[in-house]
Amino acid sequence: MTDEQQIHLRALLRAKIKRPQRLQEMRGLLGDEAVIALVMDSAEKHGVERAIDRYRLPLLAATALIEGTPYVPPVITLCGAKTRKGTTCKRKPIHGKKRCRNHGGLSTGSKTIDGRKQQGSGLRAWHAARRAAKASETR
C-alpha cells in the first residue's frame, strides 16, 4: 500500500459516512483482495470482531467480504400507514403482516355474526356522532 493510499484510508476511516458507503470506498481504493488482507491481518492479531470494529466495517459486510460475496444491505420494511399528522408510520410491522400493532397488525377482526353486527352498529353510531359534531360547529 502506498503512502497516498494510507493517507486516504485514514481519512476515510475518520469520515462521517455510512458504513456500507465506507466499505464501497475502501474496496474502490484498495481493491477486494487488499481489503480482505487488511481485515485478515488484523483478525490474526486482534480477532475478527475487533478487526472489523477497528476498521469500522459492519459484521455482515466484513463476513461477506471475507467469503468473497457482494454485500447487500438488508431491506428495512416499515408500516407505512398514514398517521394523524399525515406522515407515514415508521414503525416495524408485525412479523408476517404489513402493518404495525397500532395500525391493525394485531387485528383479526370479528369472528362471529353477532360481533360483526355490533361492530357495524358501533361504526354507524360513531359516524352519526361525527356528523352531529360537524353540524354543530358550522352553526
Image (tube, helix red, strand yellow):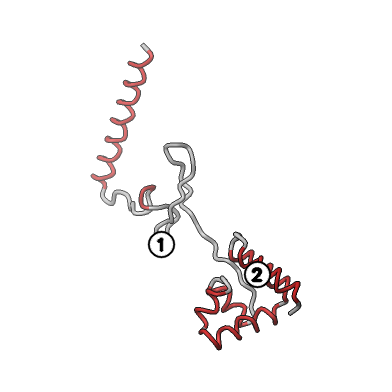
- Which residue sits furthest top? 139
Name the residue located 37 percent from the left edge and 49 percent from the top edge.
104
On screen, 113 above or below 33? above
Name the residue located 55 percent from the left edge and 76 percent from the top edge.
52
Rendered location of residue 5, percent (x, y): 73, 73
State the residue in front, 138 or 112. 138
On screen, 85 above or below 137? below
Query: Helix or strand or loop: what does disc 2 sit on?
Result: helix
Name the residue located 42 percent from the left edge and 56 percent from the top edge.
93
User: Which callout, 2 or 1, points to the residue nearer the camera?
Assistant: 2
Q: Quadrant of the C terminus?
A: top left
Circles 2 and 1: CB atoms closer than 8 Å: no
Query: Helix or strand or loop: what does disc 1 sit on?
Result: loop
**Residue at numbered disc 1:** 95
Instruction: Please tell me which of labels 2 and 1 falls first in the chain.
Output: 2
- Separation of residues labelled 2 and 1 (CA atoms): 41 Å
**Residue at numbered disc 2:** 10
Rendered location of residue 16, percent (x, y): 59, 59
Could you say which disc has been placed on residue 121 in the image? Answer: none
Q: Residues within 10 Å of mark 2 (few under 14, many from 20)?
A: few
Residue 111 appears left or right of 94? left
Q: As shown in the figure, which amino acid type bears the numbered disc 1?
A: His
Q: Quadrant of the N terminus?
A: bottom right
Rendered location of residue 88, percent (x, y): 49, 44
Q: As shown in the figure, which amino acid type bears the numbered disc 2?
A: Arg
Name the residue located 35 percent from the left edge and 23 percent from the top edge.
131
Number of callouts: 2
